Image (spheres, rainbow, N blue to C red):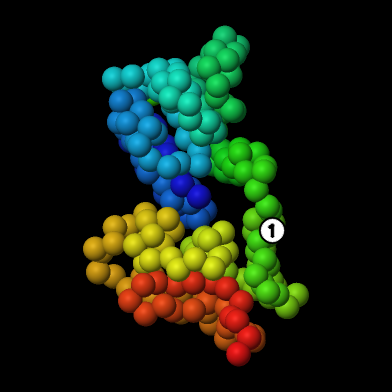
Amino acid sequence: MKILIVEDEPKTGDYLQQGLGEAGFVVDLARDGLDGLHMALNGEYDLIVLDVMLPSLDGWGVLRTVRRSGRETPVLFLTARDQVEDRVRGLELGADDYLVKPFAFSELLARVRTLLRRGKAKEPEVFRVGDLELDLLRRRVTRAGIKIDLTAKEFSLLELLLRRQGEVLPRSLIASQVWDMNFDSDTNVIEVAVRRLRAKVDEPFEPKLIRTVRGMGYVLEVPEAQ
Ligand code: CA
């Protein structure tokens, strides 16, 4: 899940980026309205956290242009001014929710999860391949009925493999979707993560579901019977 934060206060922006990153989201941060608008229109985000008072273009302007472009990306407004007309204006312009500053991070995280859930209402909440199950809402993974504990990144990686099951996913795609990294980054972070994920979801079980396609990437599927 990818989130765009548009926030000009350096401390708040850094804090939100770090907190949401630790919660398992891929997070981009824009520090003014025009940058935020550009990123919102050119990136694929599941949610935008949008401050109202911004340099160069305020949150109203960003939201209006995003909606006019036909994008339905859920927007959570951050407003310092707890005034009824602000909330009404935001909701009329197509914001999905708002939060008044100062707020507790736990509150923000709860709102973010609710909005993401609502946005994905038409999607299945549970993904399955063979006896492997991933429950998006409960953030729970089981195989053969046995609960498997995954880190936030391992969960995101497995979610991606399950959403695109049967498809060979290049490392570059995994890097951009799960880590927000570029392909030419020479770390072996993806191999390490796949190895850890396999140790948890594949090694104790049969059949093995995650397959390496040499020179191409990884695929998750039930292997064809020999
Ligand atoms: Ca601001």
Q: Is residue 97 above or below residue 163?
A: above
Q: Residue furthest top?
A: 85
At 38% across and 60% down in the image, what residue appears?
173
Q: Position of residue 122 (x, y in %)?
A: 67, 43
Q: Is residue 74 above or below residue 146?
A: above
| Position of 202 relative to 120 (above/below) | below
Residue 113 sits in quarter: top right
Q: Toward which corner of the image does residue 206 lie, by quadrant? A: bottom right
- Tell me if mark 1 has few (under 14), some (14-19) or many (20+) residues whose alpha carbon lies within 10 angstroms of its own: some
Locate residue 75 relative to residue 55 in the image: left or right.
Answer: right
Farthest-out residue, bottom: 226
Q: Residue furthest front?
A: 226
The residue to which callout 1 is attached is 126
Could you say which is closer to the camera, residue 87 or residue 224?
Answer: 224
Q: Residue at x 53, y 61 (%)?
A: 164
Q: Is residue 158 visible?
A: no
Three-letter code, disc 1:
Val
Ligand 1, by image quadrant, is top left
Residue 213 image position (x, y, % from top left): 41, 77
- Residue shown at 59% from the left, 42% from the top: 116
Residue 114, image x and y in percent? 64, 40
Q: Residue at x 43, y 25 (%)?
A: 69
For residue 82, what is the image quadrant? top right
